[in-house]
Image (spheres, rainbow, N blue to C red):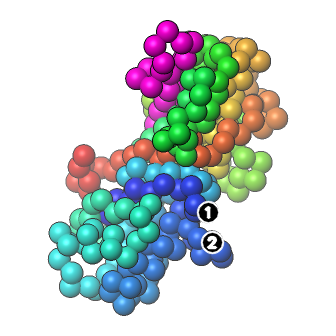
Amino acid sequence: MKVNYDGTEYDGFQTQPSGNTIQDYLESAICSLTGERLKITGSGRTDAGVHAYGQVFNFHTESPIPIERWCLALNAWLPRDIIVTDAREVPLSFHARRMAKRKTYRYSINANRFPDIFHRRTQAHHPTKLDVQAMEQGLAHLVGTFDYTSFASRRSQKTNHVRTIYEAYMTVDHSFSRPGSDDQGIIHTYITGSGFLQHMVRIIMGTLLEVGEGKKSADDIPFILEARNRSKAGPTAVGHALTLWSVEYEENIKKH
């Protein structure tokens, strides 16, 4: 299944003792629908307040509900800010996390003078001048296979911090900018990788914001990577501007 959610009110995707996670609500809805108490397997974790547009999860069910009816039936039991959009049968061997090949995150910065009241939950507001070209140059240094320890939370429990970023780019949307103003538009950063460490995208963005503000140079990025030291990178950018944009698998499992 694919699920979209506004993560504002939740403690991330993966189940927590609080019970206030996307996984908890999905499992509760499945139980209400089928009577089955089961555990779903998500394609990854998200931090508290982070959103998703097409996060994948899987589970085993004995329910006779036809596959084409699952989404509407399940959505009837879910809060309005969690929507299941796709359901399909996969081989019993399918594993949403282990079989994911590529994940894409989007980070959205509103660089206009005023916040957008309708998108404030999914954008970080940065009203002062940013050098977007320098940020793009810094982002380009992060594409490749590296040890991303400098861009991982100090609380990361992974023993291996080597990951691959396949693609990373920025787009600027001026459709919400005021004519004749110094508004810089909405800056969307898309980062596609094999997998991501705890807070990795948010630390990358916090570092790139410092580049945009002139506090760091784009050419500092290779040295930050090489240092493998969290203190060399910038702050962890706010979580609410981050969205898990897509999860990709082999063509025989899931087509786009």
Residue 236 belongs to magenta span? no
Which residue is at the far top? 180
Q: Nearer the viewer, residue 220 or 76?
A: 76
Query: What's the amino acid at mark 1?
Result: Asp
Residue 175 belongs to magenta span? yes
Q: What span is colored magenta in the figure?
A: 171-193
* In the image, residue 198 above or below residue 224: below
Apparent side of residue 134 relative to residue 104 in the rendered image (left or right): right
SS type, badge 1: loop
Image quadrant holding the N terminus, namely bottom left
Q: Which residue is mark 1?
A: 11
Q: Nearer the viewer, residue 210 or 129?
A: 129
Query: What's the amino acid at mark 2?
Result: Gln
- Name the residue at 37% across, 62% down: 83
The reply to whether callout 2 and callout 1 are in contact (CB within 8 Å) is yes
* In the image, residue 189 above or below residue 52: above
The quadrant in which residue 234 appears is top right
